[in-house]
Image (spheres, rainbow, N blue to C red):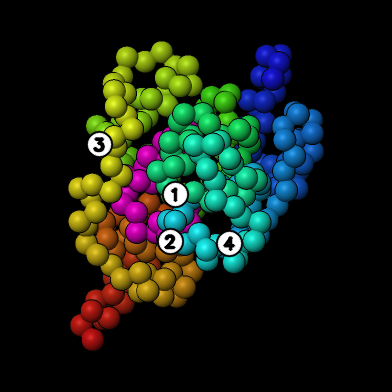
Amino acid sequence: MSEQFQPEVKKFKWLLTEGYITPQELTFYSNFYDIQMTSIVSFQGHDVLTPLFIVARPSRFYQIKRELPQAEIADPYSKKFPIISLLSLEKFINSLITLKIPYFFFSVFLHNSYNNAPPHVHGLLYSLINLVNSSYRYVIKPYNIIETESVSLSNDLQKIICHAKKMLGEKDNCDDKEWWKYNLWGKNTTSTAVDRRMIERLALKYNVSPICIHYVLAYNKNPCNLSSDVINKIKSDLSSSSSS
């Protein structure tokens, strides 16, 4: 892309990330800025723009393909990234920070099979997407990823951020040595277990994301800014269920 258009692309990216551009309007901007054509698919109650990366546990791929027959399993090693790609969280992170993804604009949907992911997972994803969106390399539209700027990341996960910065051309003296040896599910996987069916039931009852329920019950955090009344009712329902 010619450098003379960079200021306009920057404006376009800001409008997109702030929600001022609708999916319907994006087709016009795609043509105007010579970005690949997009389309809209319906997935889990959302109108989502393609190219689309559905980040899910591999055990749920078959179920997703039944819901969205166009979805195909991505293969980062051969650089095969279908318009609607299915891949695990680790493979998406590795593909993103090594700049293997061939699209300028794409959407990322974190599937509910990762609803029980600990806060640092959402923190890492949120940080990576913010970092990449601030560059001219990609424009990413996230779905179902909680904004978690205040979550602290381990040294291993900080190395991922560091490597992403260097791949994007930033001059940084941070340590990214052996960044690929990270473990997303290390120490924090021992957090209080909460039954997934209970989470889904409470999410339906109070009309909020299951991820928000999980954070309240498992980590006593409120990244979705639920009202204190709703939080108290959720905890009361869980307590009643546990004692029955």
Position of 166 with respect to 84 (left or right) is left
Quarter-of-image position of residue 16 = top right
Q: Residue 59 carries which label?
A: 2
Q: Label 4: how many residues lie within 10 Å, few (<14), some (14-19) or many (20+)?
A: some
- Residue 65 is tagged as 4
**For mark 3, what is the residue?**
154
Q: Residue 96 vs residue 159: left or right?
A: right
Mark in front: 1 vs 3: 1
* Marks 4 and 1, the one that precedes in the sequence: 4
Label 2 close to label 3 by CB (< 8 Å)? no
Q: Nearer the viewer, mark 2 or mark 3?
A: 2
Query: Which residue: 29% across, 27% down?
Result: 178
Q: Distance between the residues labelled 2 and 3?
A: 27 Å
Q: Where is residue 231 in the image (x, y as percent from the top left)?
A: 34, 65
Amino acid at dot 1: Ser
What's the mark number on residue 88? 1
Mark 1, Cα crowd under 10 Å, few <14 / some 14-19 / many 20+, is many
Please tell me whether the stretch drawn in magenta is mainly helix, strand or loop.
helix
